[in-house]
Every structure is written in C-alpha cells, then in structure tokens.
Image: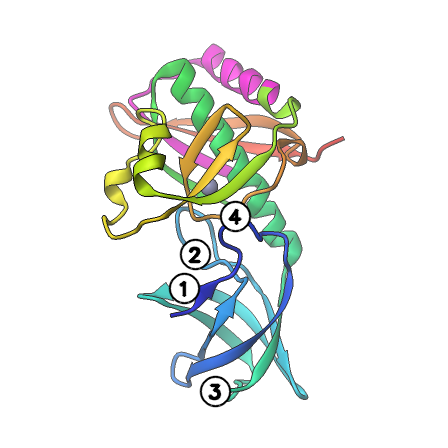
Amino acid sequence: MSEQRYLPDDEYTREFEAEVTSVDETDRTAVLDGTYFYKEGGGQPADHGSLSWDDSSARVVDVRQDHGEIRHTLEGDLPEPGTTVHGDLDWDRRYAHMRYHTAQHVVSKVVLDEFDASTAGNQIHADRARIDFEPAHFDAEDLRTIERLSNDLIERDLPVEKSRRSRDALEAETPDGRTNLDLVPDHVDPLRAVTIGDVDVCPCGGTHVDNLGELGEIEIVERTSKGADVERIEFVLADPD
Ligand SMILES: [Zn+2]
C-alpha cells in the first residue's frame, strides 16, 4: 500500500524522499512507500517529474494506481528495491492542475446553484478544463452568467480547506446533486473533503490550491452539446493580477 502523502492537505510539497518498495522491470514502474506524485484519476492527469538516487536518475512520465499501489512509470535508470530516492515534481504542470481543478469545483457549484445541473464528468489539463453538465441546455447568455458568477466567487479570495471527514458527515453536508457518492465504494470511509469557504463542500481526492485568489479569471471558451441533455463547457484561466 503506497501512502498518498498529499492527502488530505499537503498539496504544495514538490520534493520528497521515499523508499522504493518494488520495481517492475517489464513495465518500468517503481512503487514507493509514499509519494507526492498525483496518480491519474478523477479527470486529473498524472504528475510528471523525476526520481534521483546515488548517481542515477529517471524521469517520471506517468503515475497510475493499481489496487493500493501507486506505480511511477520511469524513463532512464531503474532503482533497486530498498533504495531511498529523491522525488521532484514538475511543479508548473502540477500547480496548473491544482488551479484548474479548483476552478472546476467553483464552476460546478455555480451551475448547480443557478441551473440545477449536476457535473457528469470533467477533464483537467494544464491549460484548460472541461465539464459535462446534466441535465443542461445553455445559451450564450447562460454562459456569460456562469462566467460572471464564477469570477464573483473567485474574487472573494475564499479559503479552500481539505480534510478527512466521516462518510456520514460528508454525505449530510454535500448539497443534493453536487456529487454522486454512490459511485464511491462503501468501504471508503473516511473520505477526503474539499471545502470552499462557506460556499461548497465536495468529496474529492484530487489536488487543489489553498485559496481562490490563486485562480485568476475564468473565461468560458467553448460549449458543445454531448447528447440530449448533456452540455460540455470548456474554460481557461487567466493568471491572477
Ligand atoms: Zn477536486
């Protein structure tokens, strides 16, 4: 079992030491006793970066979870099990994912409140993100409304808190339609909660910034119909002033 060390609220650590617990020479993957690399999941891509030890190093080009193990796909040297390695995250990429993922929470909450539409899926990138809403039919004015309300929220510089909460407590607190907790296996308890000021709470295992002031301004750049009741919107973030 690899420890996901960024949980629940250590998402700004970008360098760390860890011990290699196993290596798969065929797949060229290494498992560490604990890691700060985010593994692909929940619409957020894997972190990239490097591992180094002694006189050797490898680039981390993918990170996936396989049951309880976090596998780092390596290009370059392969460490031996038992080696202590120094991990170094590609911070520009990770921090961009943190900003876009947090912005996704903001837009998802705004659309739920204003249009009663739930988030059916999302995909984060380092330079854009998209969210699928259902049931939804947005016109041009709706998009401007979503943009304006999202930016109003961001301008409040609200804190983003991450914590472990019991499943029951989080279930009681999460607004109806905000997330589908039924999709999270029953045995997962406690859950990781992401709370934006007094505005939003949502179970989520991704990485996020600590304050909405880090997001900058949201601009919706595209809307696509993805079926009878599903609308996809794509947005970009301008850097904060
Ligand atoms: Zn999240």
Indicate whether 196 appears above or below 74: above
Residue 80 horizontal/vertical position (percent) = 50, 89
Inspect the image, locate mark 1, and give the three-letter code of the amino acid beneath it.
Arg
- Numbered circle sitting on residue 38: none
Disc 1: CA contacts within 10 A as few (<14), some (14-19) or many (>=20): some
Indicate whether 47 appears above or below 155: below
Indicate whether 23 appears above or below 148: below
- Numbered circle sitting on residue 81: 3
Mark 4 vs mark 1: in front: 4
Inspect the image, locate mark 4, and give the three-letter code of the amino acid beneath it.
Thr
Q: Of helix, strand and loop, which one carries label 2?
A: loop
Mark 3 vs mark 2: in front: 3
Q: Of helix, strand and loop, which one carries label 4?
A: loop
Give the mark nearest the N terminus, 4 or 1.
1
Read off the residue under disc 1: 64
Read off the residue under disc 2: 40
Judge whether residue 95 is colored magenta.
no
Inspect the image, locate mark 3, and give the three-letter code of the amino acid beneath it.
Pro
Mark 4 sits near ligand 1, with its Cβ under 8 Å away: yes
Q: Which residues are magenta?
A: 128-152
Q: Depth check: 8 or 72 in front?
A: 8
As drawn, which residue projects farthest toward the top? 141
Give the mark nearest the N terminus, 2 or 4.
2
The answer to whether mark 2 and mark 4 are in CB contact below 8 A is no
Taking the image as shown, residue 216 lies to the left or right of residue 145, namely right
